[in-house]
Image (cartoon, rainbow, N blue to C red):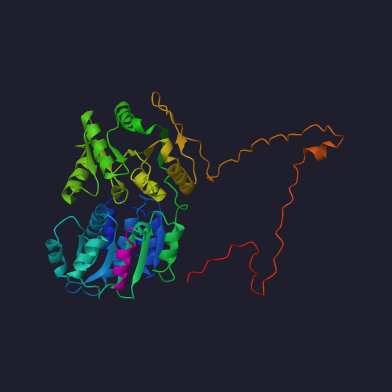
Amino acid sequence: MSFASLGLSAPILDAVKKQGYDSPSPIQSHAIPAVLDGKDVMAAAQTGTGKTAGFTLPILERLSGGQRVRANRVRALILTPTRELAAQVGNSVQTYSCNLPLRSTVVFGGVKINPQMLKLRKGVDVLVATPGRLLDLYNQNAVNFKQLEILVLDEADRMLDMGFIHDIKKILAILPKQRQNLLFSATFSDDIRKLAKGLVHNPIEISVTPKNATAKTVEQWLYPVDKNKKTALITKLIKSNNWKQVLIFAKTKHGANRLTRHLEGKGILASAIHGNKSQNARINALADFKSGKVKVLVATDIAARGLDIDQLPQVVNFDLPNVAEDYVHRIGRTGRAGSTGQAVSLVCADELKELKAVERLTNQLIERRIQEGYEPVNELPVTVLDGKKKKIKKPKKPKQISKPNDGSSDKSSAQKPSVKKQTRKPTAKRTDKPEAKKNAPRRRVRS
């Protein structure tokens, strides 16, 4: 199958060819025709399989033959959970629309809002945005949705969780009811799927890979290690394996900063990227990592989505994520576009709950390897896929049987003496006044 057979026009096909793509991926071959037909779509596919092009290409095709966009208005809105993902999607839109008379822009927080307002003034065909900044622009009358035709929720599972759902509901309330809805994600939990069904109308559901599966191109294993030895172990792994480019995920911002300082102290060039960093600092850190100026990028889960690095060889989970689905997104940064990669996790005994959740979600047990010199004192228990603990039957206590000494049987002597409960007899209700007690002392009446 070729891109031409999917119904895309020559200008878009030329832009695709310039990027070196000859044939569509499975998610693209299923999603592009459905979007071109104007259907609502719920699509799930592994990270790195071309989901962005799966909705970008048909959207551009549909908009290319439509009406001209008016001032401050938008024809297609793509919402993303992170700034990095918004920037990546925006780049894809610009790349594939290079031969089309369409305008697009990207808006997100962390930078000045005035330049973004100026770009929206003439109107844009495609707007890529994070929810918070979009609401800010709407409240300042910088954007209007009366001309909106298409809404996309990229990484829909994250957009519909408790962190974004309030902003998403506010945005949905100001959008026109008649529109095409597209939901794309690598994972769809049952709760998110139920919530998503309220946004789409008779959707075409596309799933080209097993539910919440990880890519076969990624080799996964874990090292059981005590929490206080994780920093020393990751340092050893980087140096002894001569890793040139490593993306490390930490659970907290402070943990990311602390690990970065440690690695730099050991002579390993490293940068941190997380929500407390300014947007310019995040952009510079990512650029240095991609160019090879720094060997290690330590990130929180803001980098689990939208970080597209060509042939990234290693991803390390310094801490397992609280949400199991984020594990799939994290390791999806490697092994992209058919290349191979390695995903290594450092797991301590305190993370047993998180490990079980990841293995249940992906329906596979992660291989365990022991690093010599870092064997854990606090052992990481063996896990099973169903998450059920094996019941250990406790031996029954032998009955204590007293020997009869009065000629009675063993059975009667072994029994506990029965205690007859004394029941209180019901008292009749008094119908008359009680008589005074005979011996009761008389009360002296003072005159």
Viewed as shown, does residue 408 lie left or right of 118? right
* Highlighted range, magenta: 163-173
**Magenta highlight: main SS:** helix
- Residue visible at 67% across and 72% down in the picture: 430
Give coordinates of residue 95: x percent, y percent: 23, 56
Quarter location, residue 432: bottom right
Give coordinates of residue 202: x percent, y percent: 44, 71
Quadrant of the snapshot with the N terminus: bottom left
Give coordinates of residue 161: x percent, y percent: 37, 59
User: Is residue 9 in sight in this rendering?
Assistant: no
**Which residue is at the front of the view, 287 or 25?**
287
**Which residue is at the front of the view, 384 or 405?**
405
Q: Is residue 421 magenta?
A: no
**Above-or-below relation of 399 to 206:** above
**Above-or-below relation of 91 to 41:** above
- Residue visible at 46% across and 36% down in the picture: 367
User: Is residue 93 in sight in this rendering?
Assistant: yes
**Which residue is at the front of the view, 296 or 47?**
296
**Which residue is at the front of the view, 383 or 303?**
383
- Residue visible at 22% across and 48% down in the picture: 276
| Residue closest to the far right | 407
| Residue closest to the far top | 373
Quarter location, residue 51: bottom left
Viewed as shown, does residue 147 lie left or right of 46? left
Q: Is residue 164 magenta?
A: yes
